[in-house]
Amino acid sequence: MTTYAPLLKKALSPSLFALLQILGQRGDAQKLNVFLVGGIVRDLLLGRPNEDIDVVVEGDGTAFAKELQMLFGGKVTFHPSFGTATWITAKGQKIDLVSARTESYKAPAALPTVEKSNLRADLARRDFTINTMAIQLNPSSFGQLIDYFHGKADLEKKQIRVLHHLSFIDDPTRIFRAVRFATRLMYKIEAATWKLAQEACELVKLLSNERLANELQLICSEPHVVPSFQMLDALKIWKTLIGFPFTVNNEAHLKNWLEKRPILSKDLDWFSCLAVIGYTEEAWESSLQKLAFTHQQKRFLTEVSRLKDYFKHERNLSYGELHSLCRLFKEESLQFFAAKPFEQHAALIESYVKKRNNLVPLLTGEDLKLLGFEPGPIFSEMLLSVECAMLEKMIQTKEEAINWVIHKKQKG
C-alpha cells in the first residue's frame, strides 16, 4: 500500500514531522488509532503549504491530550462538550486533538449534537470529500492514506463535492465554504452539489449573526473576492441576504475598493465589501442594516448614505463646503464613495481626504480664550471656520487665522 510518509517528511519541518511520529507512538502506547485529518492532508496532496495540525483519535482525545501534556509539557485547552482539546507544545506548535465523533442536526442551521464514534463516521460528518482524507500516524501504518469518500479522486477532478444530499440543509455555512474552496483552488463545484446549494440558499437566513459574519469575513479574506461574490450571486445568496444581485457596476466598485481601501478593522473589512451590493438602489441602506452587526458598521452605512444624498444632484462643493459636511466622517466612508465607478466627484473626495489628513490646526481653544471668546459652541464653530478657510487656501498662517476669527467675531 502506498505510504505518504516520505511526502510528510518532505513537506513538513523536521520538528513537526518528529512530533507526528511521537503522536503515533503515544497512540500505540495507549492502544489508540491516531490520524492526521482535514485540510493539511488535502494541501499535502496538492503541494500547498499548511501546518495547521488536526488529529483525530479513535478513543478519548482529551485524555490523550492530557497524557501528551504530562509527558512533553506545554499547555492544553479542553472543550469537553465537543470532545476536543488544543495542545500548545513547549515549542509553541498548536495541535488540535479530537475524539472521533458523529454529529446529528435537530433542525436546519442548528448546531450539531455530538457523540463519540469511529474514524469513518468522523470523516462522514465533514463538509466536502476533499476534506475527508486522513493519514494514519501509528508506527505500523505511518503515512497510510485513508480515503473512504474518494476525496483524492475529486482533487484530481478539481471539483468540490458534498458527501450527502442534506449537507447544506444541516449546515448552510457550507455554501460559503464551497465557494471559498472553489475560488481558492480554482475548482468547479460539482453539478449535483451546486444544485443542492441553490436549493438550500434560503436557509442562510437562519444562521446566527455571529456565524454569518464569520463566513462573510472569511470570504472577504480570500485572495479572489470578486469571483467569490460572482459565484454567491449565481447561487442567489445576495438576493436572499440583501435583496439585490451583484451587478457589473457592483463588480467594478468592489475592484476599485479592494485596490484603494485603507487599513480597516476586522468588522469593517468584510462589511465594506458587502456594501457594494445594491449600492445604487434606493433601499440600499435599509437592506444592509439587517447585516450591520456592530456600531462601526452602522456608522459606515450612515455616512456613505449621507454622501449619496450630498452628491445626489451633482452638487459642486468646494473643499470648505465638503469639510463642513464631512469633517467627522471616517476616511473609509469617503474612500468607499469615491471608489464607485464613474463617480464624477471621486477626484474631489480623494483630494479632500489627503488635504484633511495633512491639516495642522492653526488655533486651539486656548487661543480663542485669549482672543476673548467665551467657551461654548462658538469654539467649534470658529475652529471649523478656520479649517475650512485653510482648505480653501484663504488662510495659511496663525496670524491670518487670528485675524479671520476676529473679523468673524466683529461681524457676528
Image (tube, helix red, strand yellow):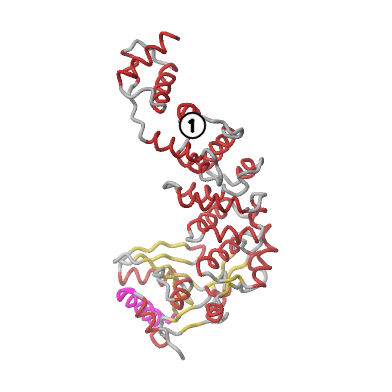
The amino acid type, in three-letter code, at marker 1 is Cys
Q: Position of residue 30 (x, y in %)?
A: 40, 79
- Residue at the extreme right: 199
Answer with left or right where residue 391 lies relative to residue 273: left
Looking at the image, is 236 positioned above or below residue 348? below
Is 16 magenta? The answer is yes
Q: Which residue is under mark 1?
A: 326
Answer with left or right where residue 232 lies relative to residue 367: right
Q: Nearer the viewer, residue 213 or 339?
A: 339
| Residue at 42% across, 26% down | 392
Magenta stretch: give its range.
13-33
Would you say the magenta stretch is mainly helix, strand or loop?
A: helix
Disc 1: CA contacts within 10 A as few (<14), some (14-19) or many (>=20): some
Is 298 magenta? The answer is no
Q: Position of residue 249 (x, y in %)?
A: 60, 50
Looking at the image, is 112 positioned above or below residue 247? below
- Residue at the extreme bottom: 1
Q: Position of residue 353 (x, y in %)?
A: 43, 37
Quarter of the image with the C terminus in it: top left
| Residue at 49% across, 30% down | 322
Q: Nearer the viewer, residue 227 or 26?
A: 227
Q: Nearer the viewer, residue 26 or 182?
A: 182
